[in-house]
Image: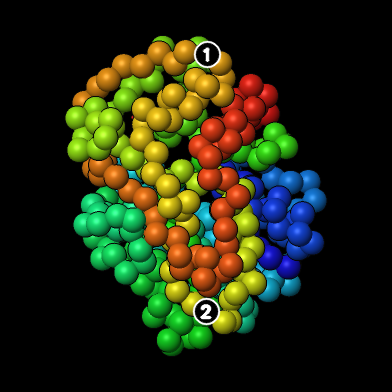
Amino acid sequence: MILVMGGAGYIGSHTVKHLLDNGYEVVVADNLIYGHREAVDKRAQFVLADLADIESLEQLFQNHKIDAVVHFAAFAYVGESVEAPEKYYYNNVVGTLNLLKIMLAHGVKKIVFSSTCATYGEPHYTPIDEKHNQTPINPYGRSKLMIEQIFADYEKSYGLQYIALRYFNAAGCSADGSIGESHMPETHLIPLVLQAISGQHQNIKVFGSDYDTPDGTCIRDYIHVEDLALAHRLALEKLGQFSGCINLGTGVGTSVKEIIIAAEEVSHKKCPVEYVSRRAGDPARLFADNRKAKEILGWYPKYIDIKEIIRTAWNWELNRKY
Ligand code: UDP
């Protein structure tokens, strides 16, 4: 039985579906602060639990025979982490310490964790490999880096088996349209572009057009959420043979302007655009060296074409269920 902490969130819910489709038994735990109950596949058991409530975690482990944990439960708004770092360090770091305490007390030593390319900070070179130094520039990134470091210490002292997956920009939605991306508030580029196209917002505000990139807008590595889900399953299957950190990105960089053009082509509609000043803390370009994921996990992203990724997000935008 796999416990998916935070399995009602965007990447968590897609991973739950993927694990179930591949024959795993899954129990989902989520506090539903940002997660959606409707996003949890009906084939999974669901438990309302919070990382801050160690008793609820204890109950969870007593009631289910858990073999491994996939841990998504975290706050993930960079801007909010700057305004309210306490919230991020307690929920993300202390919450994970609580989870590890209960796991180890029950003899569960396997964990796959959602880390982030935000642990790298401002890149010194691209594509970014796992050896790139880690100097995060906000409390969100620091909270994730601290957890990676805790895992490394727990591996040495308690035999923890862990894989921390450093995602680049998660994007897209389930190909069958059953689940998708629904953040409240939404801050991510692709859903905001699609919502501008469908008239839910006046326009998309492009943060900066004077970057040192070919078209002046920021370049990111957009990775389809189903490819992320696949990587979590492969990581689960690798636990015990490898512990450490692995990038998850396509290795392809796409600019903000290219995203807008691709979204217009997919939707056959014009996107109203407003160019505004840069957003603090946005590096000009971030994209992954994904060779380690290929070598260690045997993971190859299925979605490379940004239009195919956006097509799944547009399908969700037109038929969203939550
Ligand atoms: N972006 C933008 N307008 C928005 C939201 C994002 O121009 O309303 C840009 C942002 O500057 C970045 C890229 O889109 O270069 C992706 O941002 P997002 O917030 O989706 O992800 P992040 O890279 O911050 O994790």
Residue underneath mark 1: 269
Mark 2 or 1, closer to the camera: 1
Residue at x 63% of width, y 29% of height: 316
Q: How many marks?
A: 2
Residue 59 appears in the picture as rendered? no
Q: Amino acid at mark 2?
A: Phe
Where does the image place residue 293, in percent across and percent down from the top left? 50, 65
Q: Name the element at disc 1.
A: loop
Mark linked to residue 34: none
Check disc 1: other Cα within 10 Å, few if <14, some if 14-19, many if 20+. few
Tag 1: residue type? Lys
Relative to 135, say whether 322 is above or below.
above
**Dot 2 corresponds to which residue?**
242
Kindly tell me whether mark 2's CB lies below 8 Å from ligand 1: no
Task: Write the residue at 47% across / 13% down.
Answer: 270
Give the residue at x 24% y 31%: 216
